[in-house]
Image (cartoon, rainbow, N blue to C red):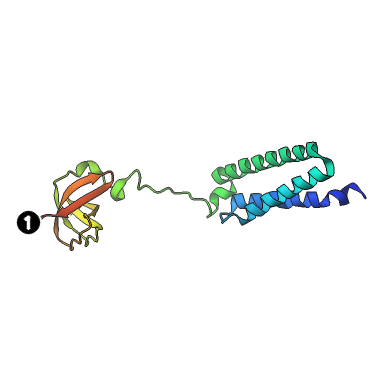
Amino acid sequence: MNWISLNLPILICLIVGMGLLIVEMIIPGFGLPGTAGAALLIAALYMVWNVAGPLAALGVFLMILAAVGIAISVITRSTRHGRLSRSPLVLRDASTTATEPSGGTDLSVVKVGRAGKTLTPLRPAGMADVGGERLNVVSEGEFIAKDSPVIIERIEGTRIVVKRDTADM
């Protein structure tokens, strides 16, 4: 038996396993290619252990780790600067809701106790006009009809809680 025919299953498992791991890194999914790739690499290590011993299996394991590290490095660089950065799989624009609360409105002008008027029904969330500013607001769970007077009760981070203004009724 020659060397190639003895080691062909090992080489096939290594190549296909690495390929499946790379596919899992690039394409989002539920892990089937990654799981299959890891299983093939483990099978290759087992076969190397049986054919050549534990020292050879350790060497193959270290080569697999190096190859996976290089693949991760190349794919990460490509998602930032290369061809993958222009792919529809990579998110380019980040959400600004954490830095610009309430749709970009500056909350420093919004004060507790200011009165306004609902622009949409609050079920319990909706829009209100407070001092000329359109704000995303919420009620305490109650329904407030459109064009109802409201007053800002409290501000919890980026959440503006309003209640029906009974003084204007």
Relative to 18, 25 lies left or right = left
Residue 131 appearing in the image? no
Comparing 158 with 107, the one in front is 158
Secondary element type, mark 1: helix
Comparing 150 with 96, the one in front is 150
The residue at which mark 1 appears reads as 168
**Outermost right residue:** 1
The spot of residue 67 in percent (x, y) is: 69, 41
Relative to 3, 41 lies left or right = left
Please state, as top left, top right, bottom left or bottom right, where the C terminus lies in the image.
Answer: bottom left
Relative to 148, 66 lies left or right = right
The spot of residue 165 in percent (x, y) is: 11, 54
Disc 1 packing (10 Å; few <14; some 14–19; many ≥20): few
Measuring 82% from the left and 40% from the top, which residue is drawn there? 53
Say which amino acid is labelled 1: Asp
Measuring 17% from the left and 43% from the top, which residue is drawn there? 111
Number of labelled discs?
1
Q: Quadrant of residue 77?
A: top right
Residue 112 appearing in the image? yes
The spot of residue 145 in percent (x, y) is: 18, 63
Measuring 53% from the left and 54% from the top, which residue is drawn there? 89
Measuring 61% from the left and 40% from the top, which residue is drawn there? 73
Comparing 75 with 3, the one in front is 3
The spot of residue 115 in percent (x, y) is: 13, 50
